[in-house]
Image (cartoon, helix red, strand yellow):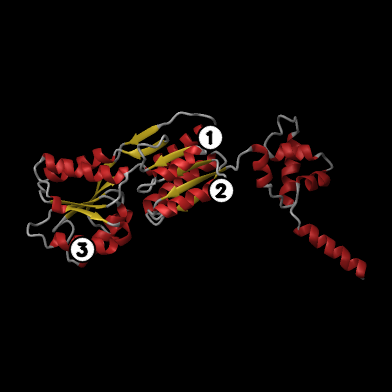
Amino acid sequence: MQDKLTGLAVLEMKKKRKVSMQDIADQLGVSKGTISLVLSGKAESGRISEEMCRKVRATAEEMNYQPNEIARSLSTGKTMTIGVIVSDISNEFFGSMTFHIQEQAKKYGYTVVTTNTNENLDEFNKMVTILLNKQVDGIIFVPVDNGQHIAARITKRHIPLVQIDRFYSDLEASYIVVDNYKISAKTTEHLILKGLKRIAVICYDFDVSALIERRQGCIDTLSKYNLLDPGLIKNIRYQYQEEDLKQAIHDLKNNSDKIDAIFFCSRKVFITGVKYMYKNAISIPEDMEVVCFDKIDSFAIANIPIIYIEQPIRKMGEKAVDILMEQMNGSNDRKQFVFDTELKYIN
């Protein structure tokens, strides 16, 4: 009876123990080298038959074999992971961008580790540290206000790097962005040519390229037509955006001269801003027209007429991964891609 119990215990331990390549080799009566070649996709170089490859894969699956990623990374010098740092994962724009990055990375056999900063410098520093400690093979990140010195830690380690959505002009690294200035100027001019004169701009108060360019594109175009009122340029603090937006909308509604339109420089500012417009009984577009710098699918469902700027999110995410892979394969070229955007309407 005791022997039987001992045997069961040994069997149970074998079930719990992680299956190795040697276990598969013993099961099939072949060498561990054969198993390694098949499971690493190098069977052809070892002249291993297709029948044996099928047997190895089937046995590995039956035995629930899981590759030792740590051992593999030590032998290849690669972890087969890339890190992604976004500034606000709750923003649908960055969520969609991360999705396309992950899908493109899969095509190269890579896994994505996604982190978030909430536009906070300390969090950005922490996320960079985490990814460097994980020894990711490359990093794609959205810059945070005043984070150049933190990003420089990545380049000093010679880790392949691509900036997306924004960029630090003094950082020697590739970037993927849209022409924020051009489309903001074009959109503002579109409003003016429609006969709208009193145009407000609401934007996060960040010193980052994308938002600076959007705000400036609006300001320069309003100045060109002698329609700029500095009091209608509202800068919103990210950490206090609810109260700042509430006050901004209140001020615009009660302005002595009627406001014709509001240009919202980002999706999240737009959604919160529109919420307060309704609370202040401001009808869109009868009282004020609105522009959102991004696509808002829910407004099409709600049949609310808005003007929006559609960014090529999928192209941006895919191109960022492609460039990163080139760098990880030895390219030293720094590439800058500036995509165009489209002005669209929900009627």
The percent coordinates of residue 109 (x first, y second) are 57, 41
Residue 259 sits above or below residue 108 on the image = below
Q: Secondary structure at mark 3?
A: helix
Using the image as rendered, state which of residue 220 and residue 154 is in the foreground.
Answer: 154
Indicate left or right for 285 with 22 as reference. left
Task: Report whether residue 261 is seen.
Answer: no
Q: Judge whether 275 appears above or below 331 on screen.
A: below
Earlier along the polypeptide chain: callout 2 or callout 1?
2
- Residue 214 visible in the picture: yes
**Vertical comparison of 2 with 90: above or below:** below
Residue under circle 3?
247
> Considering only order in the chain, which callout, 3 or 1, is on the residue closer to the N terminus?
3
Residue kind at label 1, given as amino acid type: Met
Q: Which mark is residue 328?
A: 1
Residue at 75%, 40% in the rendered image: 35
N-terminal label among 2 and 3:
2
Determine whether the residue tagged by mark 2 lies in a helix, strand or loop. helix
Instruction: Pinpoint residue 333: horizontal percent, then vertical percent.
Output: 45, 28
User: Would you name the residue on which mark 2 appears?
Assistant: 133
Horizontal relation, residue 325 to residue 26: left or right: left
Q: Secondary structure at mark 1?
A: helix
Amino acid on which disc 2 is placed: Asn
Q: Amino acid at mark 3?
A: Gln
Q: Against 171, is 283 above or below?
A: below
